[in-house]
Amino acid sequence: METQQDEAVDAIAGRHALLDSDIPFRSLANALPHMVWSTLPDGYHDYYNDQWYAFTGVPVGSTDGEEWNNMFHPDDQARAWERWRRSLATGEPYEVEYRLRHRSGEYRWTLGRAYPVRGADGQIVRWIGTCTDIHDAKDQAARNEILSRELSHRIKNIFAVIGGLIGMSTREAEPDHKAFAKKLQQRIAALSRAHEFVRPHSEESAPQAPTDSLHGILLEILSPYPALAEGRITLAGPDVRVDDRGATPLALLVHELATNAVKYGALSSEDGQVAIVISEDGDKVRLEWRETGGPTLTGTPSRQGFGTRLCDLSIVQQLGGTLERNWLPEGLAVNVAVERDRLVR
């Protein structure tokens, strides 16, 4: 019994000695605007600065040891404790967002972080942590997200209105005008699908594929074409981040290539195929479009259509990239190169 009591006394004396040696640290911690805390190597919380007590309103020393976990929202306690135990076991830095009880009784979102302090032998001698009130920032971010989704949803509706207006305006037009209007509607529909894919979403409306995915946007634009489901359009290579900056011009490019392939190229034949290959070359992203199995080509077309100029406008002028076409006997080959940072904002 005496041995256990002696060990307990030694442990307490050791903690106080360690704290007494950290007077400069505590002075600095109290001067900081953040809540600062520290623990012994085993995770025992033995110090909180003045900002902690000012924020929480609890008596000094009442959150020592494991009592700190009771300050978190009940729904966050298990998660915060699990991550803390993992850091203690692995030595990894600790970082978690949780709701911390304010002196008013309100729970406010807080970012908790802790880093290990190691001695000359590499062993952890102390954990130093901070708590930062991020409640107002999270509220503002949530409001901005709602506004962004609402604005983006209205843009989507504008695409639908424009497509409907074009259809209504051409019902009594000449046949060649109707053909032009149909092409225009299809291009607007491609832009709408691209926008829908990369726009801010709620959890309910989000697509299954990642919304910052180059693969995802290409498959979305190609989804109306039966050849994709039939396996005659293939996509290979690494995925790359893309947002609305890169999605719109890429959507126009792929839509035009696919449409022409169906009318005149490889996809006009039952055995025709299109292979799309993505590759990375330093800071550049390359997209290769290869058509095979379609009608034999006899050289470069003598006439350059609006779709061709639209592709050049999208890639060269909007994205500052390069676009090369090779009219090979076995089918069209298109090489596109764009700087990676031009695909995202």
Image (spheres, rainbow, N blue to C red):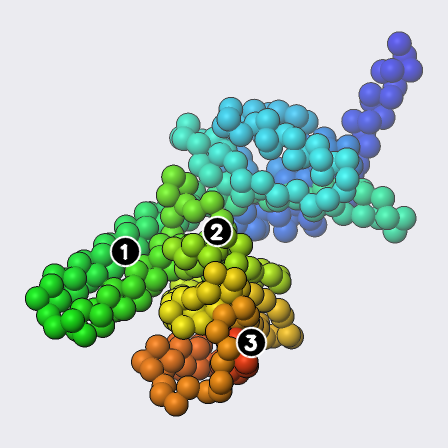
Q: Secondary structure at mark 3?
A: loop
User: 226 or 278: which is nearer to us?
Assistant: 226
> Circle 2: is it few (<14), some (14-19), or many (20+) Cα within 10 Å?
few
Report the side of 114 relative to 174 (left or right).
right
User: 128 or 260: which is nearer to us?
Assistant: 260
x then y, percent, for residue 182: 24, 66
Taking the view exactly as shown, the residue that stands out farthest to the top is: 1
Going 27% across and 68% down the picture, which residue do you hit? 183
Q: CA distance from mark 3 to mark 1?
A: 39 Å
Q: Is residue 64 visible?
A: no
> Circle 1: is it few (<14), some (14-19), or many (20+) Cα within 10 Å?
some
Q: Secondary structure at mark 1?
A: helix
When the figure is inspected, residue 81 is found, relative to residue 129, above or below; the finding is above
x then y, percent, for residue 197: 40, 54
Q: Is residue 10 visible?
A: yes
Labels 2 and 1 touching (C-beta < 8 A): no
Amino acid type at mark 2? Ala
Amino acid type at mark 1? Lys
Q: CA distance from mark 3 to mark 2?
A: 23 Å
Residue where numbered disc 2 is placed? 229
Residue where numbered disc 1 is placed? 156
Residue where numbered disc 3 is placed? 330
Taking the view exactly as shown, the residue that stands out farthest to the left is: 172
Going 53% across and 54% down the picture, which residue do you hit? 231
x then y, percent, for residue 169: 11, 66
The image quadrant where one finds the C terminus is bottom left
Q: Quadrant of residue 4?
A: top right
User: Sequence order check: which comes first, mark 3 or mark 1?
Assistant: 1
Amino acid type at mark 3? Glu
Q: Count the numbered circles shown.
A: 3
When the figure is inspected, residue 275 is found, relative to residue 315, above or below; the finding is above
